[in-house]
Structure formats: C-alpha cells, structure tokens
Image (cartoon, rainbow, N blue to C red):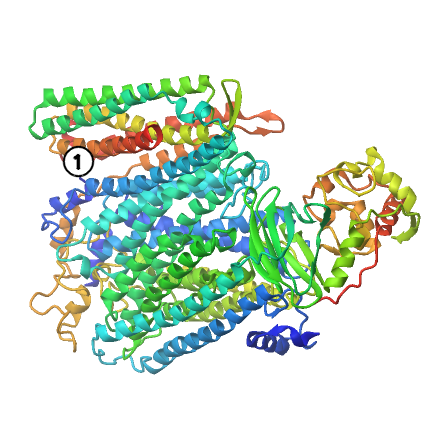
Amino acid sequence: MSATSHAHDEAGQAPLVGSLGVDSRKLGLWAFIGSETLFFTALITTHLIFYARTKADLAAKGMLEHMDPKLYLGIDLTTILAAILLASSLTMVLALAATKSKEWPKFRFWLLATIVLGSAFVLGQVYEFTHLYHEGLKLAPQYVYEGETVKSLFGVTFFVMTGFHGLHVTLGVVWLIAVYFKVRRFAASPENPMDVELVGLYWHFVDLVWVAIFTLVYLI
Amino acid sequence: MRKEARKSTIPLLVLVLSCAAMLAGCANLPATTLYTYGDHATRVLDLLTPVFWMAVGVFVIVQGALVYTVIRFRSKQASAPVPTQIHGNTKIEIIWTIAPAFILLVIAVMTFRTQAANSYQPPEAMKIRAIAHQWWFEFQYDDGKIVTASDLYIPVGQSVQIQLEAADVMHNFWIPKLAGKTYMIPGKTNYLAFKATESGIFRAFCAEFCGESHGNMRFRVIALDPAEFAQWKTNYATTPAATNGTAQALGLTGDAARGAAIFADPKKQCAACHIIEGTTAKGKIGPNLTHYGNRLTIAAGVLPYTTDNLANWLHDPASIKPGNLMGRVIKKGMLKDQEVADLVAYLDGMKFAVNMPAEK
Amino acid sequence: MAIAEQKLTSVSPATASSGSFPWRTWLATVDHKKIGIIYIVSAFVFFLLGGIEAMLMRVQLGTPNNTFLSADVYNQLFTMHATTMIFLMVMPMNVGIGNYVVPLMIGARDMAFPRLNALSIWLFLGGGLLLYLSFLTGGAPNGGWFAYAPLTQVQYSPTAGMDYWILGLGLTGIASIAGALNFIVTVLNMRAPGMSINRMPLFVWMNLVVSFIIIFAFPTFTVGSIQLLFDRQFGAAFFNPAQGGDAVLWQHLFWFFGHPEVYILILPVMGMISEILPVFSRKPIFGYSFVAFSGVGIGFLGFIVWAHHMFGVGMGPMANAFFAAASMVIAIPTGVKIFNWIATMWAGDVRLTTAMLYAIGFISMFIIGGISGITLASPPIDLQQTDTYYVVAHLHYVLFGGSILGLFAGAFYWFPKMTGRLLNERIGKIQFWLMMISFNITFFPMHIVGTEGMPRRIYTYEAGMGWDMWNFIETIGTFLLAFSVLIFIYNVLSSLRNGEVASNDPWDAATLEWTIPSPPPSYNFLHIPVVNSRRPLWDAKYPHAAGDDHHGPSSAPSQVRYEYTDEETEGAKDIHMPSLTFSPMIFSGGLTVASLGFIYINKDILGLPTRVAALGFILIGIVMVSIAIRGWILDSRKDSPYLSQHH
C-alpha cells in the first residue's frame, strides 16, 4: 500500500480502473524476484562451469574417487538444513493462513516457528562453513586436502554462491522479525495480511533457490 | 607491385575525401583494411564491398525520405488547418518490416559464406606460435626451435596458421592488410589461418586494450618469397658468431666485444631477462634478442630500427614505452653513454642479410 | 485560467517557502518531480565531466606522438569517460526525465514508491561521487568500462581504481534496479482510469520496456562485479586464468548485461522522439502498435545478441553465426521505428521548433549509426572493424547522435513543463545547427581512420599512418561541440530568469502532462483525469479532427480539465502527499561510506595497512543504514492511515 494510492483514496477519486488491481508492493516484489532469479542463475551457472572443469581435471589425474569435492560436503548436514528450510516454508504458509483468519496467537506461533527455523538454517550454514574451512576448503583457487594440493575453484564458487544465499536467508529472517513486531503492535491494521504475504513470497523464493542449489550441488 | 593487390571501390570514396582535403595528394595508408594483400582480409573486403553499397543505398533512400518529408511538409503558416489524422496502415507496416528482412537475409548468407572460408584451418598450413606479452609479441617456429619477437616472417603464397596465446592479459592479433583480428587470451588457445598473396612489410597491432602501453604494442609482418623465407629460417637458426665490429650511436663509437661483456655482466641484468643463443644470456622474461640487428623496429614497433634509437631506448626505456618491465630495471643514467654505445655495437652486429621487400 | 494556475502553484511547498533556497524540501523530498530534477541536474554535471575527459583525450590524439597526457592518465580518462557517459549521464538523464514525466503522462500523483524513488537518486549520486573520488585517492579506474579480465586483476591493475569502479557502479546498479521496479509498478498499477495498456503514451511504453530490461540485465553484471571484487580483495581467481579462472566468462557475464544496456540507453529516447514528432507534426504517431511492439521486440532480442561483442574470442563459427543472425534481426524492429517516425511527419503540419529539429536530427544520425552497425553484426567484417575507431564512430552515432540529441529534444520539449518558462528558440536553433555540424566533424572521420586501421584505446599513434589530418579535424570538432553545449547552458540559465512564461500547453500537445500547470503543483492533478483515448488532451481540443473515426473520443470524451475554480484550488490542501524524509539519503550515505571502507579492506597506504580505518568506515556505514531504516519505518507510519494514530 503506497502512500500515493492512499492519496487517491483520500481525494475521493475513482478506483484505478485501468490498472492491474494488484497490490503495488506485491507487484514490485514479484518483479524483484524475477531479477533475483537471474542473480542466482548467474551464481549457480558460474559454479557449475567451474565444477565441471574441476571434475574433468581430477578424473584425468585419476584422483576423482579420492578428491571429488562432493566428499567435503557431508550430505547429512545439508539434507537436514534443506529439510529445515522446507519446513519453514510450511510454517510460513500456516502463519499467512492464520493472519487471513485473524487468529493472532496462532499466527505468532507459526511466524516465530519460521523465524526459529530460518535462524537454525543460518546457524547450520555457519557451522558447515567453519567445518569445511577446517577440513581445508578455502576461498582460494588452491587448497590442501588430506595432504594433497588441489587446484580448483570449487571452494571459491561454493562459498560465494551459498554465502549469498545465506545472506538472503539472513535478510529474510530480519524481515520476518520486523513483521512479527509490527503485527504484534498494530494488530488491527488491515495491512497485516499483505505484510505477511510479502515476506512469505520472498521466503518461499529463497527456499526455492536453496532447493535448486541443493539439487545441483549436493545431489547431482 | 600494386596491380595484384585487391582493391575495392570504397577506398575510392575514402581517397577522394582524403585527396580533396589534402593538398599533398593521396595519403600513404600503411594499415588500411581497404588495400589487402592476404586471402583472409581480401575475403572480408569482398564481403564489405557489396554490403557497403547496399548500406549506401539504404542510407540514400531513408535519409532522403526523411529530408524530403521535412522539407515538403514543413509548416508554411502559423494557422494551418489540422492535417488529416492518419493512425497507420497495416499493409505498409508489413511491407517495411519485410523489405529490410530481405536485405538482411542477403547479407547474412554472404556473411556465412565468408565466415566459413575465413574460419577454415588448412591442415597443410605452416604453424607459427604467437604469444602476446605486455607489450610485445613473441613468435615461435618449429616447436620453439626458432624464437623471435616483434617481426613475424612468413612465406608468400603459403597458408600459415598462427597459434595465438597470451602470457599475461588479453591481447588481440591484427594485421589489417592480411587478416582480421583474433583475440589472444590467457588460458585459451585460438587459431588464425591466412595466406599472404604478395611479398611486403605489413603493419600489425595489438587491438585489444591491454594496459598502460597498449598504444605502443605493435609488430611488423614480413612476407618473403618462399626461397627467401627458407633462407631466412636457416640463417636465423644459426647461432650468431661472436662479433668484434664497431658501430656509431649518438656520436660515440661502440665496441661489440665490450658490449657482449656488458650484456653478460650479471650486475647489468641484461641476461636476467633476455636470451641470446650461443651466449650465457638465458633470461626468459623479455624478448629473445638473437640476431637483434635484423629487427625492423625497437620496443615492439614503437621506433624504427636505427642505432641512435636503440641507444635512446637503452638509456631510458620507460620514457619510450611507459610502464614496460625493462624501464623498471634500467633507469635513466644506469648505463653510461659509452656502455650504451658498446651494447648497441654488440646488438647491431648480430645480423645477417635478408632481401627485404618494400613496405606495403 | 492564468489566475487559477497562479493559485495552484502557490500550494506547492517549494514555492511557498520564499527567500533562500529551500534545501530541506529538496534533500528530503519524495516528490517524483523534484527527484527527477535532481537526477537531470546531476546527470548534466556528469555530462560536463565526461565531456571534459573526452576533450583532454582529443587534445592528446590531435597530433601524432603527442605527450600532452601520459599513457596511464589517458587510460583512466577513457575508462571514466565511458563509465560516466553510460552510467552517470545517459542512464540517469533518462531516469530523471522519466521520473518527472511518466507519472504525469499516466495521470498519477507520484511514483508507486516515493521513498524508494528518493533512495534511488541518492544511491546514484553516492555511486557517482564514489567513482569520482578515485581521482583524488590515487588513480581512477583504468581497465576500460568493460573491465576485461584479467587486466582488471589486482596484479595488472594495482591501484584502488577498479575497486572504486566495482563499488561505485554497484551503488548505481542498486539505484537502477530499485528505480526500474518503481517504474514497472508505477506504469502497471498507477495509471489513471481508462488508460489501458494500449492507450499509454509511447514514452511510458519505452520506460516500461527498459525497466524490464534493467531488472533482468543488471543481475549478471552484479554477479560478475561481485566475483571480480572477490578476485581483487580476497584472491578468489574467478577470472584469473593463471590460477584456474576463466577470462572469457567475465565477457559473457558482462555483455549479457552490456548489450541490453545499449537499449537501456536508447529506448527511452526513442520514446521521447515518439512523443515529440507527432506533436510537432500535429498528427498521431503512425502505427502506434508497431512502434510500441518494436520496442518490446528490441528489448527481447537485446538479450540474445550479447556475444556479438565477442566474435574474436574464438567461440566457434556456429556460435558466431547465431549471434550474427540475431544481431541482424534487431535491425528490423529498429528500421520499423524509423519508417514510422518518417510516416508520422508525412502529410503533417511539420513545425520546426528546436525540440523538433533535435528529434529529426536524432533520426538522421541514428540512421547512420544503425547502418554502420550492420557491418559490425557480420563476424568477418567485424573482425576487421572491431576495436578500431570505426566502432568509436558507430557507437557515438548511436549514443551521441542518438541518445544525446534525443535528450536535447526532450529537454527543449519538457523544459517549459518543468520550469514554467520556455527555452529560447533562436539560441536553441543556433545550438542545434552548431551541434549537428560539430558532431559530424568530430565523429564522421572516425569511420575513415577506423577503416584505415587506427585501433581504439591507444593513447598515441605514430605519424605517417594517414590518420594525422583526420585526428586533428576530430579534435577541432570536439571544441566546437563543447561550445555548443556552453550555448545550451547559457540558454538554460538565461531562460530560467527571462524566458517566455509557459502556459499549461505551450506546444499544442496531446498527453496528460500538458493539462496541468507549468510547473505542476506537488500533487500534479487536482482531479485524476479519466482517459478514453490515446491522446486525451488532443481529443479534448480537437473533437472533430478529420480521419479520427477509430481512435477518437467518439461517445466518451476524456475528462481532461485545466481550469479550476478557486474553491477547487483551495481543496487541494486536503490532498495528502507523503511527508519529507531524510532516511533515503542517510541510507544511501551509509552504503556509500561502507563501500568506501570496503575498497580499503585489504589495501595499504604509504605502507600502512588500512584495514582498521576501513572497518571503521564499514561500521559507520552500517550504523547510518540502521538509523535510516528506523527513520524510514517511522516516516512511513506517518503516511499510513492505519498506523499513524498509534504513533
């Protein structure tokens, strides 16, 4: 709800017949998500290009079994993280449903659950990063793993890609917290469902990006 | 000499313009793309010529229509009646959507034909490896047995395939009269095949911005008759004999034997970067200076080869080519005038006779 | 009518506070018109800076073997000239005019997100200032506006210049994306009743298309520059082949943005031309849908032609052929636009005002730039012409002969709406002819020297190549060109004081912005108009114009008014507009300070590591951003009917 469309209302103007009839902020957020999709596409593509080269390089040296970068990335922890993030999408949906039916205690519970799950994901990623770093994976084109020097951009592309995703999750958590407090303070505001819907939209997007990264990096 | 060179009608236009403005008559154009002496560049010119005339046609029609419309429908009085409100005409729209498409289709078909010819790499082509450095070109023949710099010797009438590489940043290999550009990219190897159709000395450049002295990164291509080329190669592969001659530079007489000693002296650092076959100089950072006396230019095409220019270069390389590596080591005043003259005598003494063609 | 106008303008807070310049109402403004003006003025200042850089380069190249500039300074200048003209001049000038005009054209009172709009302008200025700060702190960026790897790696470009470039353009990039989102929502959601998509003015259409191009093109550039920043600051080696990186990947990421960027620069100007030509031909645009959809087509095709900048990198003949074909196809919608513009004037009553002259000049020069582009789309010819002065000629015919002449057309056309006074037509015409002639003196010979083998981006050249005379002529042309810009500045300054006072509709125009006073009041429209045709104002003025059966007002004339009673004008006080806020400015200031810190996170000055100071800057930046976010939330509450009572 923008300040100026409010200006139209107050001046007693006719409704915006010619316009789309969608909330402006929602429209803007959809466009933003379109833009973000290309942002992550470029990051993921970069990762895949260099990953394919590393793989070919190591296979040629007969070190693939021993050196496949996937071995660094314990699949267990990341599967749990993926599950956490997917669960947070579910709690987000439940929180939105609760705002629409104006069940505020329920809403607060589900939104808090989303915040907790989102934070858990971020903390899990921090743990994963430190763990990988100590195992030898560095933000550098060359690192030592189990006594052998690996020349690969795997660490570089991996940390930058997942790091930027983590940054987006973190900003999402901050946004969720802001919405939580706003709704708690102004429970009567008719803007609330849209506020929750917007942060939910962003949250689902960030979640989807993780699904893509998880599939392309950890599973394939 | 000129009669075999491929000419097009575009130069006519360009030259007419040039001549009109220049009292001294037609300019000598050492780097023009419109007088070609190589098959690669000639095929481009043969494509450009019809495209140019089509472009002229389109220009005359569209620009003419614009000017005519403005003049004819210019408002003649302040209170002219409101003209008929025409909103469009689908039939006309479709026509002028399709008409340019036809012209473009013709250009595209001609383009693809030329492109196929120009990207073909003849298997029998003579292979030369070119490596770009900031800011000079290195050329290797016969798997590195012959290494030279700044002068690219090729045989006339025989396809050569240049294997293009870069040692540091991205560069671009361009001989306007022989062949179009191909990038030299670190970590990637490109190939360019072409054939010189006439002997001559041709200007060539690095065409991609590659740092501080990009503007000073040039080379020469010397296309020799096949027999002459074979002779050049044999001579070049021969280790230069120790020279004892003298040479004049900036008014001083240099002694080649003394120059050789200076060059080999570790304190002067020449040998740390340069190779001269048959001596202890084995540095691999700078250009290989074997048979340096045969060079056509100094500092990768910046100055014509004269003993005076060489002496100036040795005095203060940074002033001639800003940012270059040698200038960071050899500062002004580090080499005394007599030392420079001796070095000049030494470097200038290493040469053999080549029957040089004319500059084209 | 004149009296009513006086009354209306007096409501505007800008004119209400008399005396000294009302800094607060400008710096804290969220009014799209004021933000538009700030964009326009700052873009013009950057235009002058970019022009000075160009002149210094032309002096250096005026004679062979010149030593006026050192190689390094020359390289900094051409990098900054292109960066300035693209990111700090043409783009923000388009955004500025769009910001001012688009809401007026669609009958809105502001952009959809006024505070976000303010954030965009301050972020743009922060980024621009950061870029120019580099001149004072040890060297401007020197790797070219295309920043090709690996020359921009820290070992080949050790000054902080390229870091300034990355972060400065990062800030302007955020500003552009935020601005584009704002335009998309504004155009789609804020149109006056009855202004359906197929009734939108073409300038609005082109702004919509460009906004979509921006949000889809900028992310790859952002990703590329983030990766480059990681290379330079943390040794990541994305684009460093010596350590396993890929130099060509940078080119793909850059040009996937870089080519659509060209359309970002030209399409809004094509939109301006499509407004100006019909008004001064007193006819509607010929083939509205073709002009609109050719713009959309160019927008789409713009995303599949990026690699025509890379024919020489060895992608292989098949890839080259694809990108060549796609590039040639783009000529079709571009041609369609030109034909429709000429047809618009055909059989019209063509009034050669200065704005119209510039619009015609645009078409004329754009024809040349378009045709010279065809040879560059053909890979074999491109390989002879690329990286020579031929390309410099081509791009200046498109971006100066195109974008900038078009922007002058827009300036003469909308100046009266923005300032309430007309620019002097006589001086304007003198300037037009001087500019046209000197533009061609400067840039036409570049086709010739390019064809004669002169490479671009060289700081010097040797004598006797046949380039000397042309280069000298080009340099003279540059000075004439600069003089014509001075004439324009004089015209603006003198017309602001003494120019003829503009009525609501000085050009007998067709679109909604001409129904309201010049300059418009802060709320734009006292009553939101109801639109029933493509040319609401024209149809109200000429209800029975001949040949207007299908597109005219017929049964329902547009409700367009520009005369109000005093009571109505009094009522304008009740129109609620968003309040002033400094938060967007503090936010962008914080980001700028933090970026400055980030540049020095791994550097040293005079042997001293700068990390502590850098972290300090980043911290200050974060604090400023936090303060701004808090202020932003509080300010937006003030304007919310639901939240304000609790505050």
Give percent across and percent down for residue C72.
62, 46
Badge 1 is on which residue? C640
Q: From the viewer's perspective, is C463 left or right of C557?
A: right
Give percent across and percent down for residue B245.
93, 50
Residue C606, image quadrant: top right
Of the 4 image quadrants, the one containing the C terminus of chain C is top left
Give percent across and percent down for residue B334.
82, 39
Dot 1 crowding, Cα within 10 Å, few <14, some 14–19, many 20+: some
Q: Residue at x 9, y 51 (%)?
A: A14
Q: Residue at x 31, y 55 (%)?
A: C300
Label total for image: 1
Can I make out residue A183 in this image?
A: yes
Give percent across and percent down for residue C597.
48, 30
Which amino acid lies under the numbered mark 1 shown in the image of this protein? Ser
Q: Residue at x 17, y 44 (%)?
A: A5
For disc 1, the chain is: C
Of the 4 image quadrants, the one containing the N terminus of chain C is bottom left
Residue C593, image quadrant: top left
Q: Looking at the picture, does residue C335 appear above or below residue C205?
A: below
Q: Residue at x 10, y 21 (%)?
A: A106
Q: Looking at the picture, does residue C407 appear above or below residue C152?
A: below
Front-lying residue, B244 or C258:
B244
